[in-house]
Amino acid sequence: MNTKNYSLAFRRYRFVHITCYVVLFLSFGLCTIFPMTTMPGYVPILVGLLGIAALLWSAIGWIRILRNLERLSENLGKGQPGLSIARDSSPASILAKQCTETMRNSQGKIEESTERQNDISLKFQLVQKQKHSIEQIIHTIRDAVVVVDSFDRIVLANSAAEQVFRFSAQTAPSRPISEVINHHEFVAMMSHIRQSKLPHLKHELTIEKEDEKHIYDCILSCIRDEQQEISGVVAVLHDITREKEVSQMKNDFVSHVSHELKTPLASINAYAEMLVDGEAQDEEAIRQFCTVIQSQAQRLNRLIEDILNISRIESGLIKVDKQNLSMALLVRDAVEMITSYAQEKNITVHNPPAILYDQVYADKDMISQVIINLLSNAVKYTRQGGSISIDSQVNEADGIIRISVTDTGVGIPPEAVDHVFDKFYRVEENKKVAKGTGLGLNLVKQIVEKVHGGRVFVSSEVGKGSTFGFEIPMAAGQPVTTKA
């Protein structure tokens, strides 16, 4: 039944009840106005019956309405609207049916609203989960990430950004970036890209961190909303300090190599031109020129060999032939090789007696080169009449052998001690004492530390001499016989 039928039924119901009330009113009125004695005998009875009938009809109608409403209330309490409601066309039934349909429609809307609310809740939970995942991803990135909104307030910052700019990411959100990050250049860049509306901006920043200067490759990008308006800025800072250092080291290496190669090549080229031009008139001059060419060629060859050996060791491509060796025999052979060179400067070399068990598991040629390099350096920087001593120590508790070479040479300034093992490094004060390429000690360091897992060390005092040495692990197992 539609709304028009409901309205028609209620009008009809009101008409019937009004008629009953009119009949009841007229009945009582007639009885009041006209005395009983003046009317025929049946008239009062008829009027009374009509009034009683109208009253009963109206009462029955209200009782049926109340009864159906009571049933409707009970059914609603049970969650079953409209159950056992009379199915006639009386106003009470119509009212109950209309209430039932209204309740059912309301219940359907409530169920739809509940489902919609559940969907919204699930979507909200999904968005929260995605937001949490994105934040976790950003926090695990090693590069520093800082995000600000359109008012330059921090929205997000990861732990790497905390370390770079030294602030707390927990208290930073919703605060202006200028209050959180104390780096004027970075803050100005964030504001500049937002105001200029540039899509991207790349810049190198220098930031002091733990009393050291770090260089960062900073990339800034604008964030746009659905209307393509700037809603924020994200900055990613990648630490390129090491890359810069490696690049500088490569440039320095090329520069040093070029310089070191030019010196012997220039000498070879000059003396060769003099020989070609016939400037050497006798055999002695020719022999002298050829000796210079030969020595410079040997120097050039040593330089190239050192560079190649260092490069092979650093790249891990060098072939290593390790075996059990007696360190005392290796030291003895190296001393024999260097003795003639030391005698030219009247330098005394003291070699200690051999240790009973001093075996190492090492590459013979490489360790021999290490000892020879240390001895030759000691001879080069020791004045006439000086002395050199070699000391061998075995630490059985730690399983290492320690070899040290001590001279009475010119010594090294304190500020240069930590750099003597660097590539191409030469002490400025000692360049006039002896010639060199600055690769010998670096090669010693590479062989000892990278190939044999040992350690190099140095101590020196200007004017009194230096001590260079190394430690490498002892060989495990039984002693082996090594040919002298």
Image: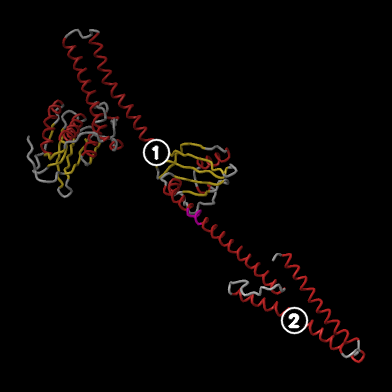
Coordinates of residue 162 in the picture (x, y in percent): 45, 48
Coloring scheme used:
secondary structure
Query: Vertical placement of 137 versus 390: above or below?
Result: below
| Residue 389 or residue 394, whichever sits in front | 394
Coordinates of residue 70 in the picture (x, y in percent): 65, 78
Q: CA distance from mark 1 to mark 2?
A: 99 Å
Residue at 24% across, 39% down: 450
At label 1, counting other C-alpha atoms closer than 10 Å, the crowd grade (few under 14, some 14-19, many 20 or more) is some
Quadrant of the frame with the C terminus: top left
Quadrant of the frame with the N terminus: bottom right
Q: Is residue 458 visible?
A: no
Q: Callout 2, which amino acid? A: Ala
Query: Vertical placement of 100 versus 217: above or below?
Result: below
- Residue at the farthest bottom position: 37
Tell me the magenta residue range: 125-129
Coordinates of residue 271 in the picture (x, y in percent): 24, 14
Locate residue 213 relative to residue 379 in the image: left or right: right
Quarter of the view holding residue 52: bottom right
Q: Earlier in the sequence, mark 1 or mark 2?
A: 2
The disc placed on residue 59 is 2
Provide the secondary structure element on which disc 1 rests.
helix
Coordinates of residue 208 in the picture (x, y in percent): 43, 42
Residue at 57% across, 37% down: 196
| Residue 130 or residue 43, whichever sits in front | 43
Location of mark 1 (residue) = 241
Q: Callout 1, which amino acid? A: Thr
